[in-house]
């Protein structure tokens, strides 16, 4: 299993926590702006108004085309996400806190989705933003440690940036002492409907039960 924490001094840990908080806030701000301007001709989302964890937007957003590589080596694009509700989370395998915490919470939600038919079961897509250290295979090994049903993918820098931009999420490399580095990234997750359109956000602090209830409800009421 890939390491879930990094060695370092307290100052380094403090820097990472501050940077992660900044990235989470920036990601949420940019995602809200991204969603706030729906494209012409897009119909109303008709999302429930009383969801507990998902912050639904009034109009879905058709995303720009993108391509990633899954853990099994196959290419993945918007068409591959159609047919099921999907939650998208950016991270990396050397992440000391946000990623393992988020994936652990999502694994609890995924366990609650398990009784649903596979064709309607919500899906988690974990995308590594650290292609210099994370191959598609190692990204999959990391994600599958938390839950075997998680889809995992990454890509070269250019298509990875295109994907994050399409989702309205952010990430950046942060140099550390000794030539090492970490990755800041949005802690907010994006919710895609069965047409692979962006329809909402899930932001920390995460409540696995609320996430599970919201996505199960959407899968049943709006397949």
Image (tube, grey):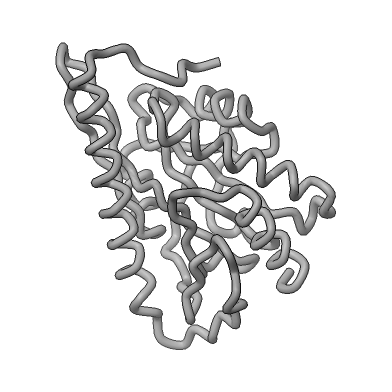
Figure label count: 0
For the point 67% across and 53% down, the residue is 212
Q: Position of residue 26 (x, y in %)?
A: 26, 54
For the point 26% across and 24% down, the residue is 13
Q: Position of residue 54 (x, y in %)?
A: 54, 63
Q: Position of residue 25 (x, y in %)?
A: 29, 53
Camera-side residue: 56 or 139?
56
For the point 34% across and 78% down, the residue is 37
Camera-side residue: 136 or 60?
60
Instruction: Tell me if residue 95 comes above or below residue 161 in the rendering.
Output: above
Task: Locate the N terminus and report the quarter of the image it occupies.
Answer: top right
For the point 49% across and 57% down, the residue is 202
Camera-side residue: 42 or 177?
177
Q: Position of residue 184 (x, y in %)?
A: 28, 38
Instruction: Tell me if residue 124 comes above or below residue 29 in the rendering.
Output: above
Task: Locate the C terminus and report the quarter of the image it occupies.
Answer: bottom right
In this rendering, position of residue 107 left or right of residue 134: right
In this rendering, position of residue 116 left or right of residue 143: right
- What is the quadrant of residue 65 in the picture? bottom left
């Amino acid at each position: 299993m890939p390491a879930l924490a990094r060695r370092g001094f307290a100052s380094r840990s403090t820097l990472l926590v501050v940077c992660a908080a900044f990235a989470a806030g920036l990601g949420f701000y940019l995602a809200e702006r991204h969603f706030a301007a729906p494209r012409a001709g897009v119909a109303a989302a008709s999302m429930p108004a009383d969801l507990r964890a998902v912050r639904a937007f009034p109009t879905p957003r058709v995303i720009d085309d993108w391509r990633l590589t899954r853990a099994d080596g196959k290419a993945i694009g918007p068409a591959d996400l159609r047919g099921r509700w999907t939650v998208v989370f950016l991270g990396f395998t050397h992440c000391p806190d946000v990623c393992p915490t988020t994936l652990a919470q999502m694994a609890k939600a995924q366990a609650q989705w398990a009784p649903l038919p596979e064709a309607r079961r919500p899906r988690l897509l974990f995308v590594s933003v650290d292609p210099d250290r994370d191959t598609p295979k190692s990204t999959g090994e990391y994600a599958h440690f938390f839950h075997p049903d998680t889809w995992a993918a990454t890509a070269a820098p250019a298509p990875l940036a295109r994907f994050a931009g399409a989702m309205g999420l952010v990430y950046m490399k942060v140099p550390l002492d000794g030539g090492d580095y970490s990755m800041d990234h949005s802690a907010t997750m994006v919710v895609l409907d069965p047409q692979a359109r962006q329809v909402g956000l899930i932001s920390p602090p995460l409540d696995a039960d609320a996430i599970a209830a919201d996505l199960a409800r959407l899968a049943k009421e709006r397949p």
